[in-house]
Amino acid sequence: MSDHELRVSKIRDGTVLDHLPGGSSLHVLALLGIDGSEGTGVSVAMNVPSDRMGAKDVVKVEERELSQAEVDVLSLIAPRATVNIVEEYEVREKKRVERPESVTGVLACPNSNCITNDEEPVETRFDVLDDGVRCDYCETIIREGIADHLDVS
Ligand code: CTP
Ligand code: ZN
């Protein structure tokens, strides 16, 4: 994107999550557990025109370098995201999200009889499949709308 189209300022230090699906950035922040209470800068741009994607979201998290493990969970809802680590205004590292083998504590099982939904719940754990995720406890598979099952309260 050329500079005259820039919607959100460049950041000095932190992480820029780019090429997020249009409209997904609030889910992305929820998945990362970022709600603003950190006190550091967080910028969100939704539905920015993109040559590659039509419309994309961009999230800039200042003063925080997100680890590969932290961003890999994003692959569930933003498989084409790029993660840019910025230092002194320069992109020092650009990485892609990678599909993790499993995700723990981020999705709620839709099966109300699942042990993870008991009154004293055990932490959820899902295996990541090619076309969805499968609960480790009851084997319920979520294929579509994974973002609707975020358990990030
Ligand atoms: N960025 C930023 N602050 C900086 C440097 C970069 O917010 N100090 C943002 C840019 O606005 C962009 C992303 O980080 O959204 C990646 O920057 P860059 O690699 O320079 O852009 P592109 O080459 O367009 O990235 P790509 O090839 O991944 O599309
Ligand atoms: Zn289950």
Image: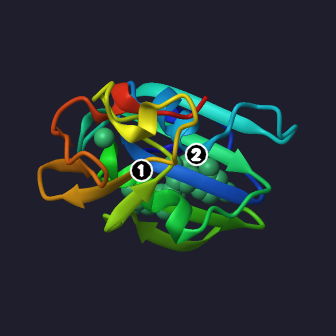
One can see residue 49 in this view: no
- Kindly indicate whether the residue at mark 2 contacts the one at mark 1 (C-beta within 8 angstroms): yes
Other-residue count near label 1 (Cα within 10 Å), few / some / many at <14 / 14–19 / ≥20: many
Helix, strand or loop under label 2: helix
Q: Residue at x 46, y 25 (%)?
A: 46
| Number of the label disc, if any, that sits on residue 32 | 2
Q: Amino acid at mark 2?
A: Leu
Residue 39: x %, y % from top left: 87, 37
Ligand 2 shows up in which quadrant of the image?
Answer: top left
Q: Residue at x 45, y 48 (%)?
A: 18
Q: Return the residue at label 1.
A: 74
Please identify the quarter of the rendering in which residue 86 is found. Answer: bottom right
Residue 102: x %, y % from top left: 35, 62
Residue 108: x %, y % from top left: 41, 35
Q: Earlier in the sequence, mark 1 or mark 2?
A: 2
Depth check: give the residue in front, 48 or 148: 148
Outermost left residue: 131
Depth check: give the residue in front, 132 or 110: 110
Helix, strand or loop under label 1: helix
